[in-house]
Image (cartoon, grey):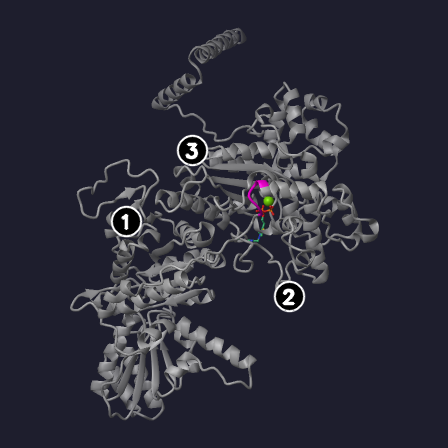
Amino acid sequence: MATDLQKSVNDLLDIENSEWRESLDYVLQTQGEERVRELLRLLQVRAQEQGVSIPFTANTPYINTIPRDKQPVYPGNREIERRIKSIIRWNAMAMVVRANREKSGIGGHISTYASVATLWEVGFNHFWRGRTDDFLGDMVYFQGHAAPGVYARAFLEGRLTNEDLERFRNELAPEGGLSSYPHPFLMPEFWEFPTVSMGLTALSAIYQARFNHYLVDRGLRKSSGRKVWAMLGDGEMDEPESLGAITLASREKLNNLIFVVNCNLQRLDGPVRGNGKIIQELEAAFRGAGWNVVKVIWGDDWDQLLEKDDTGLLVKRMDEVLDGEMQHFTLKKGDYVREHFFGKYPPLLKLVENHSDEQLGHLTRGGHDPDKVYAAYSNAISQTEMPTVILAHTIKGYGLGEAGEGKNITHSQKKLNEDELKEFRTRFNIPVSDDEIAEAPFYRPAEDSPEMQYLKERRAALGGSLPKRFPGKEPIACQTDGLIREYLDGSGDRELATTMAYVHMLAKLLRDPELGKLIVPIVPDEARTFGMEALFRQAGIYSHVGQLYEPVDKGSLLHYNEKKTGAILEEGLSEAGSMASFIAAGTAHSNNGVQTIPFYTFYSMFGFQRVGDLIWQACDSRARGFLIGATSGRTTLAGEGLQHQDGHSHVLALTSTRIKAYDPAFAYEMAVIVHDGLTRMYCHQEDLIYYITVMNETYLMPPMPKGKDVREGIVRGMYRFRPASLKKSKAKAHLLGSGAILNEALKAQELLEKNYQIATDVWSVTSYKELYTDAIECERWNLLNSGKKAKVPYLQQLLAKEHGVFVAASDYMKVLPASVAQWFPGPLHCLGTDGFGRSDGRDELRDFFEVDYRYIAIAALKQLAASGEVEPDTVTRAIKELNINSGKLNPHND
Ligand SMILES: Cc1ncc(C[n+]2csc(CCOP(=O)(O)OP(=O)(O)O)c2C)c(N)n1
Ligand SMILES: [Mg+2]
């Protein structure tokens, strides 16, 4: 009885199902696809209104996105291209093997290029355009550790010689060698984009593509259809930076951006997602973010099987197989594939009954099939509304056979024995004889061979070789004295903070008839904190679509003003994204043929500490521009406490020699530093980055002291700001101050002179880094040029005639002044802000960190007492008089 009832219910359900289906078919036939989509959307809304949730999936089946019959015809000569690719594979491998034979442990990677060769060669032969007189060329970010493949291609193209390849990872050879990875700093005419810090490539490429649109929208370049290609690894996609900005790319409709993810399913240690499917995971993330996703999973042989299969079981099997299992199908032979892949469902065994084990063992992955790759790239370059990601399935160590194909150790494989070399040679048909094989010689076909002719013809058709870096050379910004003059006179009776002076200067630069159009202000959702909101109206916030809504503060003078020609890159809360924009703007002199001048203003705490690796990358990229660390100083930024108060970014700035770091106290110092930066970076074309910290404490900005050495001193790091007023005194002290703490030194000077009759000079130290760099450079020269007239560090020259004791105080760690202590003529006591910040007022913080005028004064007295120039009990007396609590908290530990 129950079963009868169940049967009639099922019958009814079947009827209902087919009625719905028929209705849909009818609508499709009579009104078309769009109407079907509309109805489905309405039904979805209806269901949701009634509380029926619909399972979400952002995935499509685990098959190629572009069906076989939609693939364009391959325009190239597949056979010649295959031969060229094989030769490049060989040379790339031989280069690494030989380098490691010469010097064991020199490193390098074979298996990554082995997996990516087809993806790159289709690009080189058909898509990636070089720079010509009227086209800037495509921008290709090469997966860093596959660099041997780029070198091997450059060798065939005649850009590198046999000897060059022999010097892979031998950069210190007298003739110079090939850098391990793409480094514009090391090979400035070759590499354009450093890529080997995993994660930064994806992020940088997104902001680069957006910056290319920005230049067009601001009228600095003509639209040219150039593309940005980021060639990435699947393991690399785990870095948070890789996926961190993908919604920006779709929101900004970056149709000029193409990611190609080499999904060899392995990273360094093993599988990327042994228990899952990395391609599906990435598909969901990118589709969810609004990208055009093209999966290139299976080669043509698989596609043919799919066409033959009418059970749907092959797609099911493809969908369910885990990446960790897939690796076995690479490693093991065809009989294993038959039994374990197809054998799971008997109809699939039937499907491949006419395939030999040999054939099953060599079924192709999509990323190794030029037809599929070509179809994907064609699809990508024709997108008009969105960025594209191509997820290409490949085999890590492809062609290495026993030496590592698909094995977990393959990433680190650098040595092939003779048999393995032979196997590789035979597999790729390289004309190297058994006698020569042990040498692993590089192979370059004769100039008039079909391969060489073809290779050259293809590159010529695409505008020449790539990668190639074109450094900008045209001097600009050579006459900026007039721009800074007003800041040299001081602020009169108006109290200002250095941040305010900086913003004023930036606004002025933006208005400059010549430079204004080149200034790129960048800010991560902090413009109001720094008082930069006046720039919103003046310069506009860049938005490719302009402003589609009326801002709520429309009536106000400082309203939130988005526009297509806006200059400001307001990056929202992304210091990493802002730094990527800085790199794009800072390298435009070479990558875009226009010398934009970035001013990236950020919370100094979230600079070097937060995005230090991107700053490192900027230096490697030979980026130029200004990094402005605002609200800096551990005690000057009151209230914000431990996570915000920066007392160490200047220490971190020591790490890169390309960075010039300044901690100015006054508006005129800042103006002189900015002027120097403009001159050196944009007039003299030096690849430097100026890091300047600015503070939010307001005080009177004095005029620049007279004296011909002051300006030089500001730039070189130190000058005498206020000499002692006591002419006759029993003792002499020198107080060194930086940033807002210079005012504490000035107060201490008055105290020491008035209350303790000690003649005291105050020096402004704008840059310990400059002093340090100059001194170690002199020492190095003196060491290597013994017997010649020794060079004297600037610091020693400056203090040559001084005597007495020295106290240095800044809002940064003590190690900064300590770094130059050895070049002082007398004892140096360092005060600084080591320790975590606290939320409290400025006075309390300066007491806590022991950097206010009282501590400066007692430090001077203490040293004078030690040298017998004041009575020992003076210090004890001063501690009492100045109300210093000797048992106070220790900022270092408490
Ligand atoms: C930030 C960072 N961490 C670690 C490394 C070291 N490293 C270089 S390649 C690599 C594995 C990359 O795997 P994947 O992205 O899948 O590239 P594949 O070689 O498989 O193509 C690692 C860990 C690095 N270069 N950068
Ligand atoms: Mg990988």
Secondary structure under the numbered disc 2 in the rendered image: loop
Task: Where is residue 860? Give x, y as percent.
Answer: 31, 84
For mark 1, what is the residue?
539
Q: Is 190 above or below relative to 870? A: above
- The region drawn magenta spans 461-465
Q: Earlier in the sequence, mark 2 or mark 3?
A: 2
Question: Residue 873 at x, y = what percent?
Answer: 28, 90
For the question of whether residue 406 can be seen, the reply is no
Residue 832 drawn at (x, y percent): 35, 73
* Residue at left offset 66%, top offset 20%: 308
Identify the disc placed on residue 385: 3
Of the numbered discs 2 and 1, the one sitting upstream in the chain is 2
Q: Is residue 88 left or right of residue 800?
A: right
Q: Does residue 341 belong to the magenta stretch?
A: no
Q: Residue furthest left?
A: 493
Q: Looking at the image, do the residues carrying marks 2 and 1 touch, with CB atoms under 8 Å apart?
A: no
> Which of the image's four quarters has the C terminus?
bottom left
Residue beneath disc 2: 173
What kind of residue is marked 2?
Ala
